[in-house]
Amino acid sequence: YKAALRDNNIEFDESLVYTGDLYIEGGKKAAEYFLDLPIPPDAVFCVEDFSALGLMKRLKERNVRIPEEIGVIGFANEDFDEHITPTLSSVDQQTVQMGREAFKMLLQIIGGDDTIITTQSKIVLDPLPFYRESSLRENDLKRALVVDNEKENHFM
């Protein structure tokens, strides 16, 4: 987050970071915190989708329009993201592929191939953003591109 701000010449503002519980209740508390700021943010990135769900619930209770007034993005791309209103934008960390790669490495080690350990193998999986209604404003929706190739969707 700080690197992205720095790369875009934006000053870090500690008041725009909320630290709380990772669950629905934590998201609700985060919503209250952000709405009580003198100038609330126009979008919130939550560290996981359940927090984003709680945040969205509380925003709706306070009659805040999502995404028109505050956009919301989660992290994990949980199955429920497409079944709430508005649908939740999220970042998929590719946990299934992560497990596959870890299992392949484990099998190599069990099979006697210790080059993985000695060469300090590192596999990096790029996160996949899934843009859905919770972060797309009217102009974005008009431009939304749908690419439906098994979790390769960038706009939903």
Image (cartoon, rainbow, N blue to C red):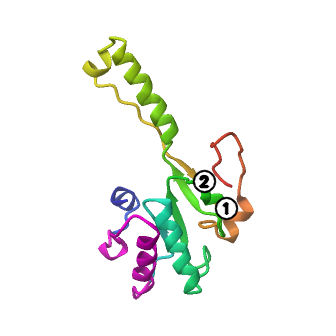
Residue 34, position in %: x, y? Answer: 42, 80
What label does residue 100 carry, if any? none
Amino acid at pointer 2: Asp
Amino acid at pointer 1: His
Residue 63 in view, yes or no: yes
The answer to whether residue 101 is left or right of residue 154 is left
Residue 145, position in %: x, y? Answer: 71, 52
The answer to whether residue 72 is left or right of residue 143 is left
Residue 135 magenta:
no
Q: Secondary structure at mark 1?
A: helix
Identify the residue shown where x is 39% and y is 81%. 33
Dot 1, crowdedness within 10 Å: few (<14), some or many (≥20)? few
In the rendered view, would you say 123 is above or below 129?
above
Q: Which residues are magenta?
A: 12-39
What residue would you read off at disc 2? 79
In the rendered view, would you say 26 is above or below 156?
below
In the picture, which quadrant includes the N terminus?
A: bottom left
The answer to whether residue 82 is left or right of residue 45 is right
Residue 14 magenta:
yes
Identify the residue shown where x is 37% and y is 23%. 106
Disc 1 and disc 2 in contact, CB within 8 angstroms: yes
**Cα distance in 3D space between marks 1 and 2:** 8 Å
What residue would you read off at disc 1? 83
Q: Secondary structure at mark 2?
A: helix
Q: Splitting the image into 4 quarters, where does residue 143 fall?
A: bottom right
